[in-house]
Amino acid sequence: MAESHSPLEQFSIHRLVPLDLGGIDTSITNSTVFMLVAVGAAILFLTLGLGRRELVPGRWQSMVEMSYELIANMVRENVGNEGRRYFPFIFTLFMFVLFANMVGMIPFTFTVTSHIIVTFALAMAVFIGVTVIGFARHGLHFLHLFLPSGAPLWTAPVLIPIELVSYLSRPISLAVRLFANMTVGHVILKVVGGFVVTLGIAGVLPGVAFMTVFTGLEIGIAFLQAYIFAILSCVYLNDAIHLH
Amino acid sequence: MELESAKIIAAGLATIGVIGAGIGVGNVWGSYITAIGRNPAAKKEIGAFIWIGFAVTEAIALFALMIAFIAMG
């Protein structure tokens, strides 16, 4: 029992199938495998749930319908009627983040969203998409987002940099929120798990109790973070479509 | 001062930032309870907003914790 493993070891990437496409490292890593597992689980959940389309849904079909309704209501409330065309994107985003987080809660798996590059790629996809949608819809009038129509002109030198910085910080905060929640949650689980082992017989009752409760909390946070990612994407989309 | 001790002190100092998040998160539910106390019918309507408020406030705590982790290693 002399060797101690760092709680950050669970986030290391291992190359499983080394591939090299023209100098770029495109090997299949454990991150790739678990992203495919998350996507596969989401596809299975949705398609098998709607296998027998009953009018009065059974349990599985009910869950699929509830998740559809949750996101459909979220998009309609936050973006309005024109936002309904962006529903597939928000739904895909929500399902991917949800299943990636949930698959990571299973012991001995790898949490895909615990890497900043993964969450940053998702957040940048949302940010770039929303900015392009804003410019496509409003042209250069989109820049009025940074100087709301009611504000007097003399406040512009102060207001515009503040609004610009807060707009550019959106993908960063979106990415870091998801990444930090997942990483910190798993680190705490590992650290307390280590304590349970070293406490031995005295650590059975409090250790198992704490691990159970905290794992439950982490599952709740996994769902909540996916929901927050989706709803904030809807809010940013609303800002771009209806300028304030 | 050695680098190792400086790292650990930096991590400890960075964690002070979560105080603000603690106050903020408590504020979210405190306001919710006050709102329910004044108007029990509002329970369903604003029930969804507490989770959004919690997650966004908690993110600030995690920003501070991230700096602590970065400082440590």
Image (spheres, coloured by chain):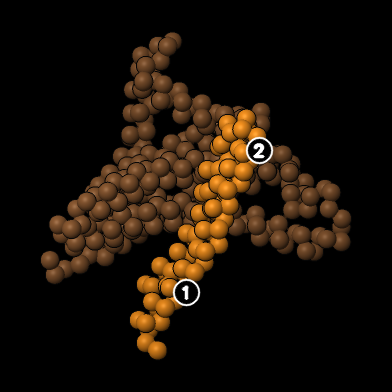
Q: Earlier in the sequence, mark 2 or mark 1?
A: 1
- Host chain of mark 2: B
Of A243 and B41, nearer the camera is: B41
Mark 1 element type:
helix
Q: Residues within 10 Å of mark 2 (few under 14, many from 20)?
A: few
| Residue wearing tag 1 | B13
| Residue wearing tag 2 | B38
- Host chain of mark 1: B
According to the colouring, which chain is orange? B
Residue type, numbered disc 2? Arg
Q: CA distance from mark 2 to mark 1?
A: 40 Å
Query: Is B43 placed left or right of A121 in the picture?
Result: right
Residue at (43%, 73%) from the top-left corner? Answer: B12
Query: Is A141 placed left or right of B70 in the picture?
Result: right
Q: Is residue A48 visible?
A: yes
Q: Residues within 10 Å of mark 1 (few under 14, many from 20)?
A: some
Q: Is residue A214 above or below residue B37?
A: below
Q: Is residue A235 visible?
A: no
According to the colouring, which chain is brown? A
The residue sitting at the front extreme is B37
Residue at (40%, 67%) from the top-left corner? Answer: B69
Instruction: Kindly report which numbered mark, 2 or 1, lies closer to the viewer in this rendering.
Output: 2
Query: Is B67 placed left or right of A51 in the picture?
Result: right
Query: Is B69 placed left or right of A32 in the picture?
Result: right
Image position, residue A47 (x, y; %): 37, 24
The tally of labels here is 2
Q: Looking at the rendering, in which quadrant would you find the C terminus of chain A?
A: top right
